[in-house]
Amino acid sequence: MRTLSTKAISADLSKIVGPVNVEVRPAALVPYRTDATFGFAGRPTAVVRPGSAKEVSRILAWANERSIPVVPRGAGSSLAAGAVPVQGGIVLALTRMNRILSIDPVDLIAVVEPGVTTQALATTVREHGLHYPPDPGSQRVSTLGGNVATNAGGLHGLKDGNTGGYVLGVQAVLADGEIIQAGGRLLKDVAGYDIVHLLTGSEGTLAVLTELTLALRPAPATSATGLAYFPDLESASNAVGAVIAAGILPSTLEFLDTRCIRAVEAHARLGLDITAGALLLFGDDGGPDEVARTLRKMAGLMPDHGATSVQVATSAAESEALLAARRCALPALARLGGATILEDVGVPRSRLPELVHRINTIAEAHEVTIATFGHAGDGNTHPTGCFDPADLAGRERVHKAFAEVFQAAIDLGGTITGEHGVGAAKLPYLPAQLGAAQTALQARIKKAFDPAGILNPGKVTQ
């Protein structure tokens, strides 16, 4: 990396985006040192806020020539240290590029800039009778560029899939500043390598996404949610298997363990049963008759697998109240110890009860508090370590416990990350899942896109 003075960097970047969109003051850089991941921080030299693909192109060409790292950033809601400038350099804040460029109700397509929030798009298309299905828990603040860069999931992933299933095309800027257009407005397009979905989930290490073409769906006529309590999480997991075996593909199958239930109730006062060992949220969307039948069928299966109580919401407001229990799990857990490490290991759905058992055994062995919630329908769990950040020994035990949790997921045919991404936080564990040959292949792909290694270094690839 060529050494440049802060003054020189500010002057050069100001010529591209204007002085108001370049920040080098130490105090102003503090929010960009971290993201939502506990325990990771970097030291950026500058933050630059481009307003167009052409500006991004000029910034990357400038940085590439000088071998200066560039870290793309949206809202900073990453839970894998994906937006942390671990090797310093320039933080490329894309939140100025926040326009919804077009909505096409015939082709069922939206074209957006990367700084549009997930909720803003969902709200806007709803006014057209349309639906953007991906709904990560951070949807109010997370940007679509970040969602695509991490292939984010959400509460409706079982039925609707992850973000990647809705990405039809991208405009992207390569490390040397060249602008490319991959994919487009077509539902079917197999010309050449699938660059669109190679860039989806690449976490800003291969290119910077500057425009997204996203598929929409007609808005469902209605939705409904139910809740069942179980004596333990293993029983709830078995009920999930029964739902799928019955030929039902619901929009929602989410679970909370007993620690989560108690934390959420203390935090939000939703009237949850704090004596239960686990809670399972189940729901569906579509036509009113179909949704009613599906909810009745799922509710009827729950007692056969140990449910002690089952209720079905009778209104949209009641459904939202039930889903609120799941959506506020993380902030509620933060109250247990002062800090949390939220992970997202996944296994085949049939192995979920075994994973849950192993997580609990590992937590007990290391004498740490791990509360577990997540997407029971697709096997993606969120074991969450709760601890006092001032207790260094306790923090170390949590890290050791999660190293074993990652290995347990791999042993069960699963993954170290189902939706949050690798970032810097999961990088040490990635070779154990991919193996040597795939790890080396990934490094060669990185080299082909980014020969100087300036794009989000220290993430996804060694």
Image (spheres, helix red, strand yellow):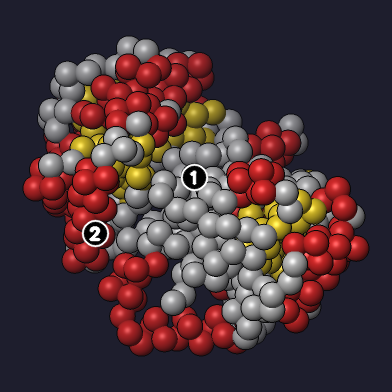
Residue 36 numbered mark, or none: 1
Residue 136 visible here? no
Labels 1 and 2 touching (C-beta < 8 A): no
Q: Position of residue 315 (x, y in %)?
A: 48, 16
Residue at 38% from the left image edge and 83% from the top image edge: 438
Judging by the rendered image, the residue that carries numbered circle 2 is 403
Instruction: Give how far apart the Cα atoms at labels 1 and 2 are.
Output: 20 Å
Going from N to C along the chain, the mark reached first, 1 or 2, is 1
Q: Is residue 61 above or below residue 19?
A: below
Q: Residues within 10 Å of mark 1 (few under 14, many from 20)?
A: some
Where disc 2 sits, the SS reads: helix
Q: Quadrant of the C terminus?
A: bottom left
Where disc 1 sits, the SS reads: loop
Q: Where, by quadrant of the figure, is residue 342 drawn?
A: top left
Residue at 55% from the left image edge and 67% from the top image edge: 87
Q: Where, by quadrant of the figure, is residue 176 drawn?
A: bottom right
Q: Position of residue 404 (x, y in %)?
A: 19, 58
Q: Quadrant of the N terminus?
A: bottom right
The amino acid at mark 1 is: Ala
Residue 334 is left or right of residue 92, and the answer is: left
Q: Where, by quadrant of the figure, is residue 73 drawn?
A: bottom right
Q: Position of residue 289 (x, y in %)?
A: 46, 28
Q: Residues within 10 Å of mark 2 (few under 14, many from 20)?
A: some
Which of the two residues, 234 or 247, is positioned nearer the viewer here?
234
